[in-house]
Amino acid sequence: MAEKTNIISDELIYIFDKKTGEKFFKQSSIQFCQITHFSIKSEKSGKTLLLSEDGIKRRFTQTPCTERKQRKDILSWLHKLR
């Protein structure tokens, strides 16, 4: 199981989506209803997301996970051969 990400750390600039391996970087943080939310932006697609600290811990990791992406690519390739 992947380590939970400490997004609050100023040292951590980049985080990676656990499912796709997509690289995101932290832009800013704001408080909503006493919960810290972070604005993060994808390097690949340019999409900006606003997620709570807990949401980021669930969805992102500190290190890129290329194994899942490689398995997904192989499975989609095999599916296309059918």
Image (cartoon, rainbow, N blue to C red):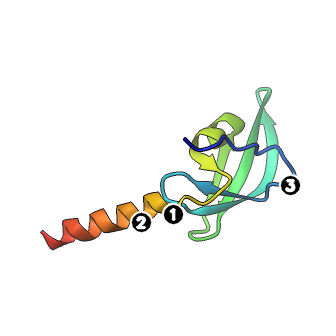
Q: Which residue is mark 3?
A: 11
| Image location of residue 49, percent across then percent down | 63, 52
Q: Tag on residue 66?
A: 1
Task: Give the residue at the far right of this rendering.
Answer: 10
How many residues crowd mark 2 within 10 Å: few (<14), some (14–19), many (20+)?
few
How many residues crowd mark 1 within 10 Å: few (<14), some (14–19), many (20+)?
some
For the residue marked with disc 3, what is the amino acid? Glu
For the residue marked with disc 1, what is the amino acid? Thr
Task: Name which of mark 2 and mark 3 comes first in the sequence.
Answer: 3
Q: Nearer the viewer, residue 24 or 9?
A: 9
Residue appearing at x 54%, y 41% in the figure = 1
**Measured along the vertical axis of the image, is residue 20 above or below residue 52?**
below
Q: Left or right: 19 with respect to 11?
A: left
Task: Name which of mark 3 and mark 1 comes first in the sequence.
Answer: 3
Mark 2 residue element: helix
| Image location of residue 78, percent across then percent down | 22, 68
Q: CA distance from mark 2 to mark 1?
A: 6 Å
Q: Nearer the viewer, residue 49 or 15?
A: 15
Residue appearing at x 47%, y 60% in the figure = 67
Check whether the beta carbons of the residues at disc 3 and disc 1 lie within 8 A of each other. Answer: no
| Image location of residue 14, percent across then percent down | 72, 60
Q: Nearer the viewer, residue 1 or 60?
A: 1
Mark 1 residue element: helix
Q: Which residue is mark 2?
A: 70
Q: CA distance from mark 2 to mark 3?
A: 28 Å
